[in-house]
Image (spheres, rainbow, N blue to C red):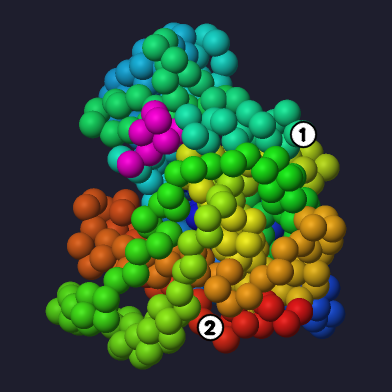
Amino acid sequence: MRLLPDRPSIEFLRKEAKDLLAVLRESSPGTSLAEAQRVLAGEYGERDWGALRAEVERRVADAPAAPPGLAEELAAAFGLGVVTAPARPVVFTAMGRCWGITTDRGRWLAVTVYPWITNEQAEVGARLREAATAAGLATPMPARSPRGWLIESVRGENWRVHEWLEVGPSPMLPASVELARRAGAVFGTLHGLAIASDEPIHGYLTYRRTPAEWQDLLGRARAAGKPWAERLEALLPAFRDLQAVELEVPSRLMLCNRNLIPGHVRQGRGGELVVMEWDFAGSLTPELELGSALTQWVLRPDVNVKGLRAFREGYGGDWPRLELGSFAVAISGWLNWAYNAICEAIDPKDADQAIFAEREAVGVLERPMTCRGLEQLLVV
């Protein structure tokens, strides 16, 4: 689901709606602006344009303030210099809130990361990012702490910091033909690096929960009085079908970004895609990463046929042969994301997480991954 910033602008959303209208008219010329506004509202987890406007007004009136001293502690941990302005809230994500920090050395973006993203894991991503930068991809420069680390613990959480870039928003879905082509080119560049990796595929991308665990989750949702519990029950057979698609782990793996989703890139000048996230990097194959990429870039909200063709064109001439098993990692990742989002919605750790998780839970249940949708990606 698309995330609203902490200080959204209704004027900017109007522009996004007009941009989305142009994309929708690529496949449905008769689409109206009102229809595009409704689709955009749904992408942000709101029922219609009026609800989206109300959410913008609420956020503007209730923008969060940084905990006292947080900016100074982050600046000290990463050697950013002297803080010269209050920390500015940027956006709340699954990993926590991001803060804009201004010091006498420049502007920075500070991001909380999952506990498993240690400095060692971040260095894996740094290796790929440096090679990608040398190959011409755009990405912000990370800040290293005085001891040379990319990840530091501040107030009990893991943080990373990178330079502030003046970039546009993350791409809208459905992707335009040009955007899909640019995204495909990014993946083609990364796979062309062909950096060998001998680490196993991360467990999050291979682990499958048992039917009993899903039944237990359904019971917890019902006990919590969640209005979407019946929808979850109706989808459990589709989840079992997904789980039947097994992962065959290949013997040769390469270093991949592994989470190059629309929400982790920004649009730079001239439409250039700026890759913001590298901390999930690790072992995959081109087939498995492309299987995941297609579900993120051209399967939402429906199969984007023109976008898929453009994505393949952008990738280049060495498009690998994909089959249903190529989506195995995408399936595991999506099912685990859905399970965790529902868990968080049932028992959130704080008010911010409650809002985020509830919207994510509704989003995954309203737009579930299905074997039929994956099969459609193979016939285009």
Give residue 10's quadrant in the image. Answer: bottom right
Give residue 179's quadrant in the image. Answer: bottom right
Q: SS for tag 2?
A: helix
Give the CA distance from mark 1 to mark 2: 36 Å
Which sits in the foreground, 366 or 130? 130
Amino acid type indicated by mark 2: Cys
Does 206 appear above or below 90? below
Residue at image mark 2: 371
Across and down, in percent, residue 143 comes to: 51, 21
Which sits in the foreground, 226 or 254? 254
Residue at image mark 1: 136
Neighbourhood count class around disc 2 (C-alpha, 10 Å): few under 14, some 14–19, many 20 upward:
some
| Left or right, residue 40 beside residue 356 | right
Across and down, in percent, residue 123 comes to: 48, 29
Q: Does residue 103 show up magenta in the picture? A: no
Neighbourhood count class around disc 1 (C-alpha, 10 Å): few under 14, some 14–19, many 20 upward:
few
